[in-house]
Image (cartoon, helix red, strand yellow):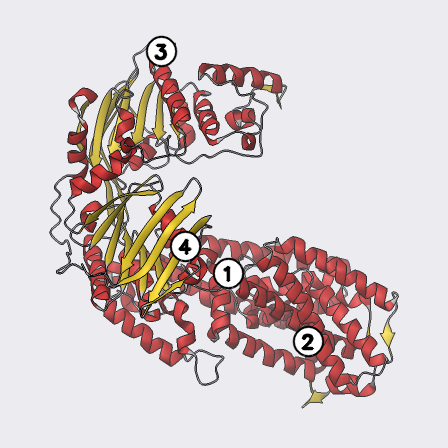
Amino acid sequence: MTKLSDRKDLHIGSKFIIKEELVKHGIAALPIIIVLLASLIIGLRVPNFLTARNVINILEQSSAIGLMAIGLSFVFIVGGMDISIAANMGLSGIVGAVLMRIGLPPALACVVMILAGTLIGMINGFAVAYLGMIPFVVTLSMMYVAAGASVYLTEATSISGLPEIFVNTIMMRIWKIPLPVIVVVIFSITATKFMRSSYLGRWVYAVGTNIKAAEIAGIPVRGVKFWAYALAGSFAGLTAILNTARLASASATMGTSVIVLDVASSAVVGGVSMYGGVGTPLGAVIGALLITLISNSMNMIGVSYYLTLVVKGFVIIAFIGFDYWIRRGNE
Amino acid sequence: MNNSHFKLSMQNIVKEFPGVKALDKVNFEIEQGKIMALIGANGAGKSTLMNILGGIHQQDTGEILINGKIITIKDPLDASKKGIAFVHQELTALSKLRIMDNMLINDYPTKLGLIDDSEAKVICKKILKRIGSDLAPEDLMEDIGPGDQQMIEIARALVHKPKLILFDEPTSSLSKKEKDNLFKVIKKLREDGVAVVYITHLLDEIYGLCDEVMVMRNGRVVSSGLIDEFPKDRIICDLSGEDGRKKNVTKKSFIVKDDVVLVVEDLNRSGILHDINLSLNKGEVLGIWGLMGSGRTELVRALVGLDPIESGTIYSICDGHKKQIAPHDLRQLVGLVTEDRRNEGLFQPMTVAINLSIANLKAFLGKSGVFIDRKKEKNEVEKTIKKLNIVVSSQSQQVRTLSGGNQQKVILGRWLQRNPELFFLDEPIKGIDVNAKAEVKNIIHELTISGKSILIISSEIEELLGFCDRYLVMNRGSITAEFPHTATKEQLMEASLSAREKGIMQ
């Protein structure tokens, strides 16, 4: 790389290249650095913070948000938006819980939950990709549909009394590490690998980067968009399994709008650009860790929940500003 | 009103863009009460020159003087303060707003800090009357036709009482009647003591309208003077010029045999393309020549389904089987290079490797059938980089940081990997340096040797000559002439400029 600046043909680009390197490694590393630094600082001031139990607790708390953030990162990278992802998760969980209550085997109920989430994602994807509707409007409406259906199905109560085997299996620990945490780790790595080196993944980046160029390069742009939304739905369904098991119940409050904000901000904080084309699922999961860390540590210090929202909000704005600044440099 | 006689001159204006010298010591002068025609092919520098006057670009060196005093023009607002107004080629209307809002958007009359609508109406009425328009200021912009919208553009320019108005190809979207009306308005402005610069490449328009003419080519002024001294053949001669590009790549042999691979019959898109019929032979380079706005880009876009068509049939002929094919499916068979490299060709922030392999990813699938075999991909990318001599620091260099010529080679390389039988190339050598031009043309030449068929559009007529087996000339959405490989510059230029006289347009 040292020779780069000597090359005349690259001269115009050298300024960009430096910034690019900084950005490429910086943006990936920044959330990790912040997570570590914040943990250290909080750990020094709050005695119980850096205990194994609390660390595992934070990891477990962040797993649901992280899993949905993986799903949302597909949609963000393709240049879209999915506000319905949390409500989708809630409804899928309720559908699964209701079916388990009337005797469907848990394994089958899990499959149904994933399918339900995928189906809702497909509806979103169809409306956006093939009908050309605006993502914000489509998924906002879908959020109402799913939230309304959730309350209607549960009659605003919580569906509990789920089979023990379901709860115990999903919440099982392997070497003290909760299964949900392992699931998130596995999926964040495979999803990132999938995005980087499957052709669908490459296409998602290409469409999010430049939809016109993608179309001219012969990429089936609509199909790519459709599957990005469908995949986001699948991850909502997957999250539904974890959440219903963790709570040992399902209710309409699982997928409230605050959760959407947490998921979206995880992705953004983790370096997934809302403008499309940039970021990785792994980054989104690290973002989820940071968002959970803020809530958890503030809670342990005894800061009000509402003040925590204020802090979270500012952190998100700061990261979106950072994202925009980098994007502008890339134009 | 004008107590001093208005006169603007530009001296030794130089303007460079990365890789291109857009203006090379250009001198220019205009005074009030005159209409000057500014003529030149695409890329001749006329728009750049006017953009400097309009404050959109700044000159690198050289001076602008108004009535003998040196001035600087910082931005469009500054230009308008100095009495220069710009009527753009594309309509820049705010379509959901009223006519009066469009005219006064940055200069509303106010009363107590609020917009004075009734005063605004009076102002607009007055200006509209001046240009002979009876449109109501309250009408919505989207409810009026393109001709009237063009009038509003002019009316908007007149709000600031300009002393010089620049018209950049104002007739490209107008009907005959609207055009006549426009010319009447321009002549009236001349009587009012306004100086007018009229940019066009339609020669027929300037006679009877303009007083002076200036011809530009390749960033230089070729000739200028009174219109009476410039008969049409002289302008054509000046426009095309004998440039003598040494590096020009020419074909060694030309195709004459009839081995058709693509046939287009009666393709229509209302207002854009009219009754397009063409065929493309195996191994042939078919050059499409026409001026900007002639429909050449639109033709390619329609063929591959990027724009809709209203009627027409496309056949692809493979191994002697003639088969009708939908534009959308044709796109899968064509290596498509569009004119807008930055926005439609490249994934700018992505790496050279990704940009090269994106159209051909399925070929790199590994054993899993899901993931790409990076090694396979890397090898193939390396081969293409070597083959096309693309100058990069590494495969993971961002494509945005490459020079124009290397970027173009990346796009071509993308299609070479996919290896289609047909290539549609829209301005493949535009805005790249001389060496890269020669290299790109050599790549195209090699493609034809291996039996690929090329449809090429270029506004650089010298580059097409001696390189195509056949030429089609387009004008206003129709194919108006066909020439064999022996065509000369003058023939092509003449055909693209005067087709209108033969009554082919409209």
Residue extending farthest to the front is B321
Residue named by callout 4: B313
Label 4: chain? B
Q: Is residue B340 visible?
A: no
Task: Identify the residue shown where x is 83% and y is 75%.
Answer: A98
Res. A16 visible in picture: yes
Q: In what element is the residue under mark 2?
A: helix
Mark 3 and 2 residues: CB-CB less than 8 Å, in contact? no
Question: Closer to the N terminus: mark 4 or mark 3?
Answer: 3
Q: Which mark is residue B250?
A: none
Pick the front one: B284 or B373: B284
The residue at which mark 1 appears reads as A208
Instruction: Give the image location of residue B66, x and y in percent.
Output: 29, 21
Q: CA distance from mark 1 to mark 4?
A: 33 Å
From the viewer's perspective, tell me whether residue A238 is left or right of residue B18: right
Q: Nearer the viewer, mark 2 or mark 4?
A: 4
Task: Please name the amino acid that badge 3 sits on.
Answer: Asn
Crowding around mark 1 (Cα neighbors within 10 Å: few <14, some 14 to 19, many 20+) is many
| Pointer 1 and pointer 2 on the same chain | yes
Instruction: Give the CA distance from mark 2 to mark 4.
Output: 48 Å
Residue B2: give its label: 3
Q: Chain of mark 3?
A: B
Label 4 – label 3 distance at C-alpha: 60 Å
Residue in front for this viewpoint, A284 or A79: A79
- Element class at badge 1: helix
Residue A318: x and y in percent read: 58, 56
Quadrant occupied by the C terminus of chain B: top left
Distance CA(mark 3)–CA(mark 2): 76 Å
Which residue type does callout 4 highlight? Thr
